[in-house]
Amino acid sequence: MKICVVGAGSLGSTIGGVLAQSGHQVTLLKQSQKSVDEILTNGLTLNESGQDQNIKVNAITASDITQYGVADLVIVLVKSFDTFKAMTAAKGLVGESTVVLSLQNGLGHEDILADIVGRSHVIAGKTYVGGVMQSNTYINSGVKGKHTIIGELDGRLTERVTQIATAFEAAGLITKVSSNIMGTIWDKLLVNVATGAISGVTGLTYGDLYQIPEVGNVAMKAVQEAINVAKANGIQLSMENPEAAWLLAKEGLSNDFKTSMLQSIERNAPTEIDFINGAVVRWGEKVSIETPYNCTLVACVKGIEARISQQANNKH
């Protein structure tokens, strides 16, 4: 397959690298020409469990898309808030039979992508594959034993989804096709709702977060709201007890682990709040369900983002 990864950071490079290694024509869409040049010169090195593997992979910037032409599969892994801008710039990758697969965090990108390329092109998924970027060309990757789930937005089991899953499997990415991908997305969302915003607001790592009963209480109230909203929207969840999501969130993670929302705040970077707790609020409004806990967490994180932005402006 001719595959282009839009948002080739640590995770995009890991998945792209593994697919390239198994024989697919993979191109990483990067923001800077410097990154492109480094990848074209040195290849991509994936380090899995201390073993280095150097992989030859193509790379381009958005200005090269016309020359590149259309892809069979576009994998979208940009940060949620960059979805519109990145996919609008990459629209030239999408031809008549191109599939656009979002493996992003949170909920709502599938609608943004559908508005840009047409809903019939879009499929969605969740992946537990990991990656930490050491440099533009060197990634500590976590692929072994990590699952990826993909599916059509309407739950149909189509040939194109099966083909993509088969290609992923052959590359060593454990991949399942789901007839309830929106349920899968919501299941992962519940876990993010449980700890993301509350850890970002308090600045606490997982070890401390779970020691404070009041924190657990608020987290589970926010998750309960998300469960109520999902059910009212006809979503089939695999868990209906908020405590299950709260406990699942810390499973297998060290006490000093920081949620991605806290990491973003500490880097003075925008968070994905609009696609996590914010998604619960929006979907709640559609079915007239109030979500006071999620509304409050969204307001607190937005307040922190505004303060960070003001401090940055004051420095200039």
Image (cartoon, grey):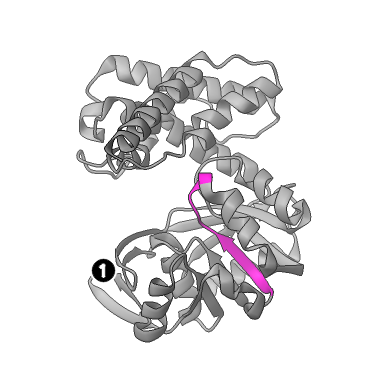
Numbered disc total: 1
- Whether residue 195 appears in this view of the structure is no
Q: Which residues are magenta?
A: 70-81
Q: Is residue 112 magenta?
A: no
Tell me the kind of residue under disc 1.
Ser
Q: Which residue is mark 1?
A: 49
Residue 286 spot, x, y in % from top left: 70, 23
Camera-side residue of 247 and 37: 37
Rendered residue at 70%/20% (across/down): 287
Camera-side residue of 263 and 224: 263
Figure quadrant of residue 264: top left
Q: Residue furthest front?
A: 316
Rendered residue at 27%/38% (across/down): 315
Rendered residue at 49%/60% (across/down): 7
Specify whether 174 is left or right of 176: left
- Whether residue 63 appears in this view of the structure is yes
Neighbor class of circle 1 (other Cα within 10 Å; few <14, some 14-19, many 20+) is few
Instruction: Check the image and report above or below for 280 versus 72.
Output: above
Rendered residue at 42%/39% (across/down): 271
User: Which secondary structure, mark 1?
Assistant: loop
Residue 36 spot, x, y in % from top left: 43, 75
Residue 68 spot, x, y in % from top left: 63, 79
Instruction: Check the image and report above or below for 250 versus 75.
Output: above
